[in-house]
Image (spheres, rainbow, N blue to C red):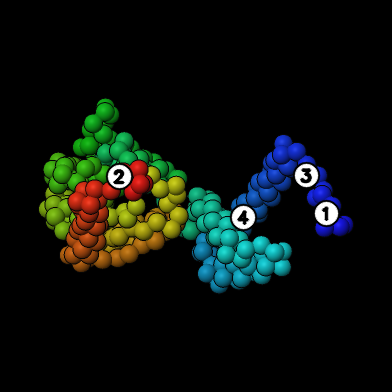
């Protein structure tokens, strides 16, 4: 072809987009097949008491996919990002199939006080996913917090932080002595003290380090602060791990000291940004 020869005619854009759509559908079919194999893998792992996550396998997989990407002229970094997301979805599926839930763990009755709020719904779904019976009590339910706690083996307080201690004092006396009382507030010393005072049952403080809007619980973190009753604390650890949460153990004072630092710095950062924009006065459209 001479330098003056015109380039070959391109296909219409509709045809090109149609081919891309067809290829994307093939990719989706392959992803569905992959997840079907993951379900088989989950059954094998549960039968042999294996963990969902295998860090060595993941490193090997990522290295192989990067090498294959480079051979195909693709960006190794982008392909790695794609496969990390695929592995995350794989782990989430395995967790939903209860891979790490012990066969001998009996389902419990769990009361979620404040179960129609954001984090309450999340926690209620967590226990439901793992086969537990969930009783929800909230401002708009016929079942009162006291009734729910009296019928449950585990009671979880998921109300706003300003109401937490009052609700604990209200509900605590109704929690069976053989049961467990937990909360989910972002501070731990005061709620933990309130729970220990309000009930003779086992007590565990928890702080989910995620909001209700997360797409998945897989890999999210939760802090556990012991109060009373190691057997129930171990039960909670097994439940949270089985749903894919990463657990950090801390005493209440240590937790609150860390949260004071983290949360204050977050608010200070926001204030500094707002004050700077206000004083410099840049046009809003430009700053966006």
Number of residues whose C-alpha sits closer than 10 Å to that of mark 2, classed few (under 14), some (14–19) or many (20 or more): few
In the image, residue 70 above or below residue 36: below
Give the mark nearer the N terminus: 3 vs 4: 3
Q: Identify the residue at image location x=52%, y=61%.
A: 52
In the image, residue 151 above or below residue 65: above
Q: Which residue is mark 3?
A: 10
Q: Nearer the viewer, mark 3 or mark 2?
A: 2
Q: Nearer the viewer, residue 120 or 203?
A: 120
Give the mark nearer the N terminus: 4 vs 2: 4
Quarter of the image for the N terminus: give it.
bottom right
The answer for how far apart the CA atoms under marks 1 and 4 are is: 55 Å
Q: Which residue is mark 4?
A: 38
Are discs 1 and 4 less than 8 Å apart at CB? no
Q: Identify the residue at image location x=38%, y=44%.
A: 213
Q: Nearer the viewer, mark 1 or mark 2?
A: 1
Lateral position of residue 21 relative to residue 213, left or right: right
Mark 2 lies on a secondary structure that is loop
Which x, y percent locates residue 14? 72, 36
Q: Which residue is mark 2?
A: 283
Which x, y percent locates residue 123? 35, 46
Q: Which residue is mark 1?
A: 4
Give the mark nearer the N terminus: 1 vs 4: 1
Give the mark nearer the N terminus: 3 vs 2: 3
Number of residues whose C-alpha sits closer than 10 Å to that of mark 3, classed few (under 14), some (14–19) or many (20 or more): few
């Amino acid at each position: 072809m001479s330098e003056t020869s015109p380039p070959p005619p391109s296909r219409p854009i509709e045809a090109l987009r149609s081919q891309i759509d067809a290829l994307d559908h093939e990719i989706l079919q392959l992803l569905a097949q992959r997840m079907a194999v993951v379900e088989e893998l989950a059954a094998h792992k549960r039968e042999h008491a294996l963990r969902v996550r295998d860090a060595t396998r993941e490193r090997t997989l990522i290295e192989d996919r990067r090498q294959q990407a480079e051979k195909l002229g693709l960006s190794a970094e982008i392909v790695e990002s794609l496969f990390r997301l695929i592995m995350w979805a794989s782990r989430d599926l395995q967790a939903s199939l209860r891979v790490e839930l012990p066969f001998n763990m009996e389902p419990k009755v769990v009361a979620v006080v404040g179960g129609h709020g954001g984090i309450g719904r999340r926690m209620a779904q967590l226990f439901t996913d793992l086969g537990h019976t969930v009783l929800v009590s909230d401002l708009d339910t016929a079942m009162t917090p006291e009734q729910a706690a009296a019928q449950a083996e585990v009671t979880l307080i998921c109300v706003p932080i300003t109401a937490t201690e009052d609700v604990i004092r209200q509900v605590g006396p109704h929690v069976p002595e053989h049961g467990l009382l937990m909360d989910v507030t972002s501070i731990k010393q005061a709620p933990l003290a309130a729970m220990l005072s309000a009930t003779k049952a086992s007590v565990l403080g928890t702080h989910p380090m995620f909001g209700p809007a997360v797409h998945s619980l897989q890999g999210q973190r939760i802090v556990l602060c012991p109060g009373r009753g190691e057997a129930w604390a171990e039960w909670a650890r097994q439940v949270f791990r089985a749903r894919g949460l990463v657990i950090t153990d801390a005493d209440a004072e240590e937790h609150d000291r860390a949260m004071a630092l983290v949360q204050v710095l977050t608010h200070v950062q926001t204030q500094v940004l707002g004050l700077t924009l206000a004083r410099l006065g840049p046009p809003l459209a430009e700053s966006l």
